[in-house]
Amino acid sequence: MIGATGNVGRELLPQLLAEDVRVRALVRKPTSLPEGVEQVVGNLTEPASIDTDGFDTVFLVWPMFDTTLVPEVLRRLRARRIVYLSAEGVPFHAEVERLVEDAVPEWTFLRPSGFATNTLGWADQIRAGDVVRWPFAEARRSLIHEADIAAVATRALLDDGHQGRKYYFSGPEAISQAEQVRQIGEAIGRPLRFEELPPDAARELLLARGWDPTFATGALDAWGAMVTEPERVNEVVREITGRAPRSFREWATDRAAAFRA
């Protein structure tokens, strides 16, 4: 497993362990992971350090925009089946998908809607006050709980029938960013409000946070489009896992502590 310490990976590990399968995590240095997870030290930027001998099924997260090292990493993985956490409409993800298709006989690409966990980017503002300043209050997103992404990944890793599939899947409803802020406020017991930030000011904010300029522009364009064309909602989580996806309200309740001062 690659990406064990990320938002999805930390949800995926216990779900896999509950299936009574052997789990090995590639980590840059030994870290705290659930009991029963084998840790292998390696680095994606140094493919020669990767040794996954004995494992032919891999959950893959590619954390870099540069895809130069992907072919060599895939060779070192020696996988039969790869489940790749991808995204729709992102060029570097499309390139990784192409490379995975060329490298392994069995692959599944997971293209979830917006991650609910990305709203943690508002946490500093919420801990400091009662206003979230952000662009596009009425952009409607079908945000998905990372536990549901992990549930879909578990089935794609362990079950047959998902090979060669490219799954877009979402949370249960598309709600505005202003409504997301309101629901976070309810989860933490404080009234919060959304204050519209002009796109130019938002872009400067994103750049100050270290965002790549092209990625920042693309994100703002996408959020702006969701004002009139909300992010899609579908039933794929239920179809694959047998249960409905968690709501944003449930996610906010689960993560309330992160927004409290």
Image: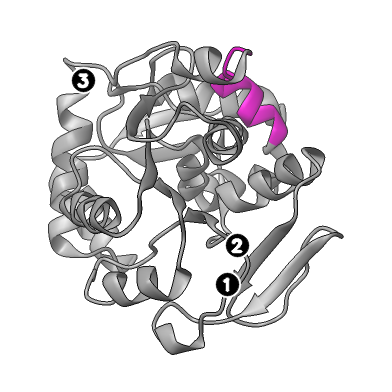
Question: Is residue 207 visible to the viewer in this orientation of the structure?
Answer: yes
Residue 251 position, x and y percent, is 62, 29
Q: Tell me which corner region of the image, top left, top right, bottom left or bottom right, holds residue 170.
A: top left
Taking 77 as reference, is 255 left or right? Answer: right
Label 2 neighbour load within 10 Å: few <14, some 14-19, many 20+:
some
Residue wearing tag 1:
52
Residue nearest the observer in this picture, 210 or 89: 89
Sequence-wise first label, 1 or 3 = 1
Tag 1: amino acid: Thr
The answer to whether residue 144 is magenta is no
Q: Which mark is drawn over residue 55?
A: 2
The stretch of residues the image draws in magenta is 243-254
| Disc 3 residue type (three-letter) | Val
Contact, mark 1 vs mark 3 (Cβ under 8 Å): no
Q: Are marks 2 and 1 in contact (CB under 8 Å)?
A: yes
Total marks in image? 3
Depth check, mark 1 against mark 3: the one in front is 1
